[in-house]
Image: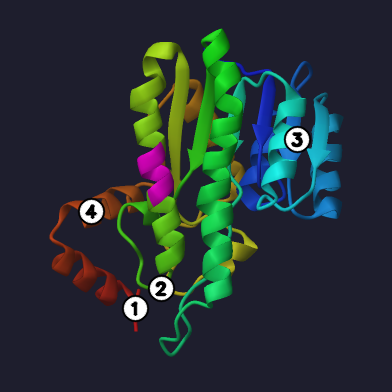
């Protein structure tokens, strides 16, 4: 691969994709900075990465704690690759009940606001040295909002737009920005989502594709085919058609 980052930050490292990414990148000479919500799970990921020869630093705290988040990021120093992967989900109830407002607020703060905050914190050092890479984990739901997960879809659409805007802004400064748009990846969060889940991938397969896409500096890393092709069309077609297709596929009441 042409791009081999040595100092890598991964948030959401206790999740399915995050932990798989950490283990995919772990190797001698690599320093991993892993954030996760659950210390016990985070310690397990760190142990497996150290067994592969990587240096690992962990942190477990609420990403909504802005002061602590920024202070931690400032301690890390220069980073080659920042993968902003932490995310939560909620959904409408089985009888059309709205998403709980407390969960809506938390999703916006964790999925979107903390991601923007991380970018703001790590970007000055990258711009100063004229290099670095930032990867934002969006979702195929960012193409067209799923009726069963409106807030999740909104946050992922926001990350997609933000990442694409950053790429256009920062490309001339030597900073790579990539948007990762997974479909269904086997995980407890995936299992909890209502509706059909076609073309489910393992976290390990997803991590390998993401690593290759980042090494090649792909603007969008979306998978799996043909689900990514279908969701792209949902954004292109008239909204009434797309909603009708989603209802026929089982996404809706």
Question: Could you tell me which quadrant the C terminus lies in?
Answer: bottom left
Q: Which residue is mark 2?
A: 148
**Front label number (2 vs 3):** 3
Location of residue 69 in the rendering, given as x and y in whole percent from the top left corner: 70, 41
Residue 206, can we see it?
A: no
- What main secondary structure does the magenta stretch of the protein show? helix
Q: Residue at x 62, y 59 (%)?
A: 187
The answer to the question of whether label 1 and label 3 lie on touching residues, with beta carbons closer than 8 A, is no
Closer to the camera, 106 or 226?
106
Q: Is residue 121 above or below residue 251?
A: above
Q: CA distance from mark 1 to mark 3?
A: 41 Å
The magenta region covers 158-162
- Say few, some or many: other residues with alpha carbon within 10 Å of mark 1 (under 14 / 14 to 19 / 20 or more): some
Q: Of the residues under marks 1 and 4, which one precedes in the sequence?
A: 4
Q: Which residue is mark 1?
A: 252
**Front label number (3 vs 4):** 3
Q: Assign a secondary structure to mark 1.
A: loop
Q: Which residue is mark 3?
A: 72
Q: Kindly indicate the quadrant of the structure image that contains residue 55.
A: top right
Q: State yes or no: residue 100 in magenta.
A: no
Q: Is residue 223 left or right of residue 244?
A: right
Q: Which residue is mark 4?
A: 235
Q: Residue at x 75, y 26 (%)?
A: 76
Closer to the camera, 62 or 53?
62
Q: CA distance from mark 2 to mark 4?
A: 17 Å
Q: CA distance from mark 2 to mark 3?
A: 35 Å
Q: Of the residues under marks 1 and 2, which one precedes in the sequence?
A: 2
The answer to the question of whether label 1 and label 2 lie on touching residues, with beta carbons closer than 8 A, is yes
Q: Is residue 108 left or right of residue 56?
A: left
Q: Assign a secondary structure to mark 3.
A: helix
Q: State yes or no: residue 159 in magenta.
A: yes
Q: Of the residues under marks 2 and 4, which one precedes in the sequence?
A: 2
């Amino acid at each position: 691969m042409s791009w081999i980052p040595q100092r890598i930050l991964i948030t959401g490292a206790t999740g399915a994709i995050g932990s798989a990414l950490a283990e995919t990148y772990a190797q001698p000479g690599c320093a991993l900075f892993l954030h996760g919500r659950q210390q016990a799970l985070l310690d397990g990921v760190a142990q497996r990465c150290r067994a592969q020869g990587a240096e690992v630093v962990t942190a477990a705290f609420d990403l909504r704690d802005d002061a602590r988040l920024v202070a931690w990021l400032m301690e890390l120093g220069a980073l080659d690759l920042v993968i902003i992967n932490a995310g939560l989900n909620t959904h409408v109830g089985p009888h059309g009940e709205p998403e709980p407002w407390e969960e809506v607020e938390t999703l916006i703060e964790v999925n979107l606001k903390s991601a923007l905050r991380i970018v703001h914190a790590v970007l000055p050092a990258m711009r100063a040295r004229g290099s670095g890479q930032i990867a934002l984990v969006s979702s195929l739901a960012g193409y067209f909002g799923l009726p069963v997960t409106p807030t999740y879809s909104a946050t992922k659409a926001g990350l997609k737009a933000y990442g694409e805007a950053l790429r256009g802004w920062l490309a001339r400064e030597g900073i790579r920005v990539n948007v990762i748009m997974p479909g269904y990846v086997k995980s407890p969060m995936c299992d909890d989502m209502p509706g059909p889940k076609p073309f489910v991938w393992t976290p390990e397969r997803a991590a390998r594709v993401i690593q290759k896409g980042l090494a090649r500096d792909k603007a969008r890393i979306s998978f799996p085919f043909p689900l990514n092709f279908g969701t792209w069309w949902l954004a292109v077609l008239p909204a009434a058609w797309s909603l009708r297709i989603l209802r026929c596929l089982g996404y809706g009441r």
